[in-house]
Every structure is written in structure tokens, then in C-alpha cells.
Amino acid sequence: MNKQEYINAAEQQLLHTYNRFPLVLDHGEGVYLYDTDGKEYLDFTAGIAVCALGYSNEEYKNALKAQVDSLLHTSNLYYNTPVTEAAGKVLAASDMDRIFFTNSGTEAIEGAIKAAKKYAWTRDGHAGHEIIAMKHSFHGRSIGALSVTGNAHYQEPFEPLMPGVQFAEFNHFDSVKELVTENTCAVIMETVQGEGGIYPVEPDFLKQVRALCDEKDILLVLDEIQCGMGRTGNMFAWQHYGVKPDIMTCAKALGCGVPVGAFLMTQKVADKSLAPGDHGTTYGGNPFVGAAVSAVFDIFEKQHILEHVNDVSAYFEEKLDELVKKYDFLTARRGMGLMQGLVCELPVGKVAAEALNQGLVVITAGADVLRFVPPLVIEKKHVDEMVPKLEKAFAAVSAG
């Protein structure tokens, strides 16, 4: 089939829950994607912060092939070696104590919510506990995850959602403090808000919330699904602040393309929360995804990914700042490391579409932000290649 035939077939067969760009991808190599016509695209999206190692990494591919030849899946009624090895590596990198592997970030959020509620139930001997979440947040599209997502647009068609959720202003401590009641069991937030417009948490705010949680025996849940796994220059974004969560979620780059997520917790939470029968999954933590996660951590270490992110992100920020100074319609840059956003007064959807015509893949966040979450293996030469492509997209949109 040709490109248009693939698009027509997809439109007839797939549930229309995405407004897709007219692009049919075929394969990837390094930090480039190629469509079915053979056109090359510089990728500054990484499958929405998933493909941290880029495409066709030989060590990663060989680890997956070896596991396919060995054992793909076995029930969680039994132990398996790859996921045990993976668990040790994730826990060591995060300084957490216990981990539960899921199939996605959304499922990790669901598990975190359940763990927080069970912790409070064990502590207080009753249900009916409440959660404080943040406005403009995004945690996923299941009912539980939607319930703590601070965007009415995503929520309204699916109400009533999970009760007992109140929304505070991100980076405004008093708005959190005034919502606390004797039934509050958790405060949940993204360490760097993604869909809401690339807003990093402010240090004082995070420290104040941590202190409040300690005072009231409330659990701090940090969502690191998009901002974690090295994207900000530390393995997890909260490590920049020295403020450790009680529960943490991660996914996306955790498996670099293999569907896997996880929620992690301290031993204090584990001792009083989920017990046998409280939670489970058929596929989560099977040997195949365990091998993927284990390989990702090995490659991160061998290739010094964190050091590389810190080096190239400083250059990337410099080039984005130059664009903000150059164009009046760019009003700000926000972000950390290789999770960056440009606030843009041009229609950002049109800019992203025009960028594809220029051979560049970028996406948006919110109504007015161009989002850049490239593979963590990009080099400065790729930043230099990206800038003129983006400028050509700006020119085409500005010209109407």
C-alpha cells in the first residue's frame, strides 16, 4: 500500500481518538525517523519522551531478541529473573524501597492512588480519604487518573469521576495548605508539568509541600512519567530538589518503547499499603519488559546518558533562548534539561504541522507551547539542524 492507502485504512479501522498528522512512519535510525516514502525526519519528540535511546540501538535490540528466544511471559504467581534484576536497578537509581511494574504510566498512577488510599485506611481504620492534585496537571486517561488530572476538558464527558479530589494551584503553597483536612491522604503532582505547558515545580513550593506532608502524615506522590528517566539531567527530576517522594510513578523512557510503567514507594508506605489481593496485573513485570528495563539502565550507565543530557541541554537552552530573543511571537522558554517548551503566539498546531513539512518532528503542550522532548542521545549538531527547520516552519505559518 502507498501512504494514502495506509491512512485511509487506519481511518476506517481505528477508533478515531487521535487527530493524526498525515505521516506514516516506517522505521527509525539514531535520532531520525523515516516514512513509507523514505523521507527523513529529525525527531525532537521521541514518541512523547519515550525513546530516550533513539532508534535501533543495537545493545537494546539484542537484549530484547535474547529475551524473546528465552521467555516472553510468565504469570506473576511465579518469580522471573529479568524483572528482579530490573527492579534492583530502578530502586538503586531512585533510592526507593519497593516497586510494582505496570503496563503504562496511567496504570502506575492508578496503583499510586490505591497505595495512598490503602495507607490511610490502614492508619485510620476507615475509608473516605481525599487527595489534593494540581490544576493544569495531566496524569492519564483512565477514570482514576482523570480524577486527579486538573483539566475540565478531559474530565467533563466522563463524570462522575472518583470523589474526594481537590485541586490546588501549582507552585502556590497556600492553595495546597487551605485544602488539607483530616481526611487528606495524599498530594499528587508532576515534578515538571508536561501537558499543562512545561512548568517545573519551584524549589520552595516542593519543600513546603514536603514539610506539610511530613507534619500531617500525608503522602507526597510525584509523577515522573514524562520528566523522569534522565530527561532533566538527573535520573528523576525530584533529585534536583533533594525532596524525596513517598510514592513515585514512572513509565515512558523506562522501557524506551516497550510498554512498561511502575510505581515505587518507601518501605514506610509499603508496610501499610498494598498487600496480597489488593492489586495485580497479568502482564506487568513479565520477563520481556524486565529485560527491556534492565537493558535501558545498563545502556544509560555505559553511555553516560545523564552527563550527556547535562552537556547538550545547556547548548539546547542557549539556542532556544536565542530564538525567543529573535522572534516577537516567542514570549518565553520553560523547562529543565531535554524537556523544554517555547511559549508561542502563532498557532502551535500549525507550526508543528509545518515543521513536519520541513523534516522536523515537534509536538505541542497546552494551547500555546511548542514542546521539545527529543531522544536523550541527541548531539549539539542535531540542535543546530533543528533550529533552521523550525525557523522555516515559523516563516511558513507567519506568511499564512
Image: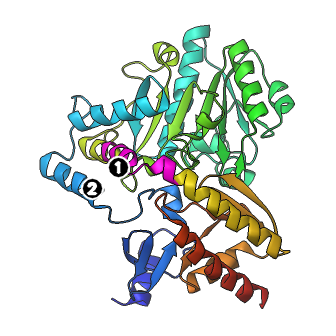
Kind of residue sitting beneath label 1: Ile
Q: Nearer the viewer, residue 130 or 386?
A: 386
Residue under the image location 59 percent in, 27 percent down: 245
Residue under the image location 23 percent in, 51 percent down: 63
Q: Is the C-beta separation of discs 2 and 1 under 8 Å?
A: yes
Residue carrying label 2 = 59
Q: Position of residue 235 (x, y in %)?
A: 51, 41
* Rendered view: 326 above or below 221: below
Q: Is residue 251 left or right of residue 186?
A: left
Q: Is residue 77 left or right of residue 220?
A: left
Q: Position of residue 46 (x, y in %)?
A: 49, 63
Residue carrying label 1 = 299
For the N terminus, the quadrant is bottom left
Kind of residue sitting beneath label 2: Glu
Is residue 65 located in the magenta-colored stretch of the structure?
A: no
**Quadrant of residue 150 within the rendered picture:** top right
Q: Is residue 250 left or right of residue 134?
A: left
Q: Position of residue 351 (x, y in %)?
A: 68, 78
**Quadrant of residue 201 within the rendered picture:** top right
- The segment highlighted magenta reads 294-308
Secondary structure of residue under mark 1: helix
Any part of residue 125 in sight: no
Q: Is residue 348 left or right of residue 71?
A: right
Gap between marks 2 and 1 measured at Cα: 8 Å
- Is the magenta region chiefly helix, strand or loop? helix
Q: What is the count of numbered marks?
A: 2
Q: Position of residue 50 (x, y in %)?
A: 47, 56
Which callout, 2 or 1, points at the residue further toward the start of the chain?
A: 2
Is residue 298 located in the magenta-colored stretch of the structure?
A: yes
Residue under the image location 71 percent in, 18 percent down: 183
